[in-house]
Image (cartoon, rainbow, N blue to C red):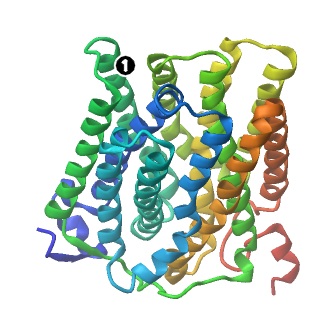
């Protein structure tokens, strides 16, 4: 039961289904059941029901990222509860907020439900990232995190396949789908609370804000990742609905293809990161994203069609699946006691651009949509230049290629 406390070093004596990595797997599967449903329906829901334009969706997405900007507050929460408890409680909050989304279709109502679910999502992700890096051995981390991406993709795949079925065949409305998906996630969170013991990590975590000079490259990469990813998350899918008239089942089918690809390739990517290292993996990701964002711009400037846009959308998702290489880079350079507070700090850094850019670029989108992807290309190029500063074998004291000059 949850009142039982088990040290990580003793966790292997538990049945397989009650071990720490299994709990991470269950939660990784549960989150997309609600969140992916919310994402899949969002653009159609706000356009058809909420009568949103590019400016409105930009503001909604900016508000959604505010809790990410405030993820540093996790450090304060950890004075009162352990990370495992925070992760489960946050997962439950996501489920409940998504379940009631369609009850509040106005702009103000959607802002309210969105920020509640976002608090749950970002605090869950912060706690989960910390638990992953504490509970999973460094040597196994790239492969295990690759499988975590695949598990999350499986949850999304099931959610999207179900949406296609119930929307086209059973003719469910938005409210019924949101209620069902959110309730499933909330129920799984309750199961995690009841069924799993409390796991004690091997190193006691700092409970104050940690900012270390030697982590500067990790902070910079996180900042660029948040800015770059948010442009894709907000405007790539919005383009599919606004420019090409995608319906709910068509957007969802595109998401299905994305997550089938992630299920297949994410474990292979984990093996690739373990083999070639974080530096080469991130360079590969950022070169690919430069090409993809330039091609998105070409869709507007040269009138390239829907088939290319859909293909780029899938490729884009595959490149973003490599983001776990940034986690394992930090795991290799970090003091073990820094993991929890730095997870909170890095989430805040990651969301600085994510909060500011959607609203600003939403206005630009109304007048010059192609320019949004030109800006994204610039962010990808900056990310590439930063990735070139990662050493082939990062470790404490050798965080960047410049560290060689100061090593004793």
- Mark 1 falls on what kind of element? helix
Q: Residue at x 76, y 63 (%)?
A: 391
Q: Is residue 408 left or right of residue 238?
A: right
Q: Nearer the viewer, residue 407 or 300?
A: 300
Q: From the image, which quarter does the N terminus lie in?
A: bottom left
**x and y percentages locating residue 285 in the rendered image:** 70, 42
Q: Which residue is mark 1?
A: 164
| Location of residue 109 with respect to 402 vertically, above or below | above
> Is residue 204 positioned above or below 180 on the image?
below
Relative height, residue 397 to residue 178 (above, below): below
Instruction: Give how far across and how far down residue 264 sits, in percent.
Output: 47, 30
- Whole-percent x, y for residue 71 in the image: 52, 69
Foreground residue among 71 and 224: 71
Packing grade of label 1 (10 A; few <14, some 14-19, many >=20) is some
Q: Is residue 327 left or right of residue 389?
A: left
Residue 182 is at least partly visible in this image: yes
Q: Give whichever of 270, 242 is nearer the camera.
A: 242
Q: In the picture shown, does residue 372 fall above or below 401?
A: above
User: Which residue sits at x=20%, y=49%?
Assistant: 187
Residue at the left extreme of this rendering? 1
Query: Is residue 25 visible in this depiction of the protein?
Result: no
Percent across and percent down for residue 371 are 84, 35
Q: Is residue 300 left or right of residue 335?
A: right
């Amino acid at each position: 039961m949850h009142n039982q406390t088990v040290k990580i070093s003793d966790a292997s004596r538990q049945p397989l289904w009650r071990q720490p990595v299994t709990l991470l797997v269950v939660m990784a599967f549960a989150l997309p059941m609600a969140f992916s449903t919310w994402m899949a329906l969002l653009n159609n829901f706000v356009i058809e029901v909420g009568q949103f334009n590019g400016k409105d969706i930009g503001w909604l997405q900016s508000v959604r990222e505010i809790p990410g900007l405030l993820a540093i507050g996790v450090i304060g929460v950890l004075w009162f509860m352990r990370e495992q408890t925070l992760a489960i409680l946050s997962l439950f909050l996501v489920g409940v907020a998504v379940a009631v989304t369609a009850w509040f279709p106005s702009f103000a109502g959607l802002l309210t439900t969105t920020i509640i679910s976002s608090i749950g999502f970002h605090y869950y992700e912060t706690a989960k990232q910390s638990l992953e890096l504490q509970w999973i051995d460094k040597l196994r981390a790239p492969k295990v995190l690759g499988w975590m991406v695949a598990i999350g993709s499986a949850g999304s795949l099931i959610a999207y396949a179900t949406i296609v079925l119930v929307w086209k065949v059973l003719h469910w409305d938005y409210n019924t789908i949101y209620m069902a998906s959110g309730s499933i996630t909330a129920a799984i969170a309750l199961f995690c609370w009841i069924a799993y013991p409390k796991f004690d990590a091997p190193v006691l975590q700092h409970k104050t804000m940690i900012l270390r000079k030697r982590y500067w490259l990790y902070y910079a990469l996180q900042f660029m990742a948040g800015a770059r990813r948010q442009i894709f998350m907000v405007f790539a899918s919005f383009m599919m609905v606004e420019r090409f008239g995608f319906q709910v089942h068509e957007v969802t089918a595109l998401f299905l293809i994305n997550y089938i690809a992630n299920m297949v390739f994410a474990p292979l990517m984990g093996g690739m990161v373990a083999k070639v290292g974080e530096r080469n993996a991130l360079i590969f990701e950022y070169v690919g994203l430069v090409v993809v964002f330039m091609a998105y711009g070409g869709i507007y400037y040269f009138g390239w069609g829907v088939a290319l846009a859909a293909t780029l959308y899938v490729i884009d998702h595959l490149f973003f699946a490599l983001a776990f290489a940034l986690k394992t880079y930090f795991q290799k350079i970090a003091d073990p006691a820094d993991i929890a507070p730095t997870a909170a700090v890095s989430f805040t850094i990651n969301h600085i651009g994510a909060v500011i850019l959607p609203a600003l670029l939403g206005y630009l989108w109304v007048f010059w949509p192609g320019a949004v992807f030109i800006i994204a290309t610039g962010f990808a190029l900056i990310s590439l230049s930063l990735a070139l500063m990662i050493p082939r074998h990062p470790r404490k004291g050798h965080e960047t290629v410049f560290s060689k000059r100061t090593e004793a």
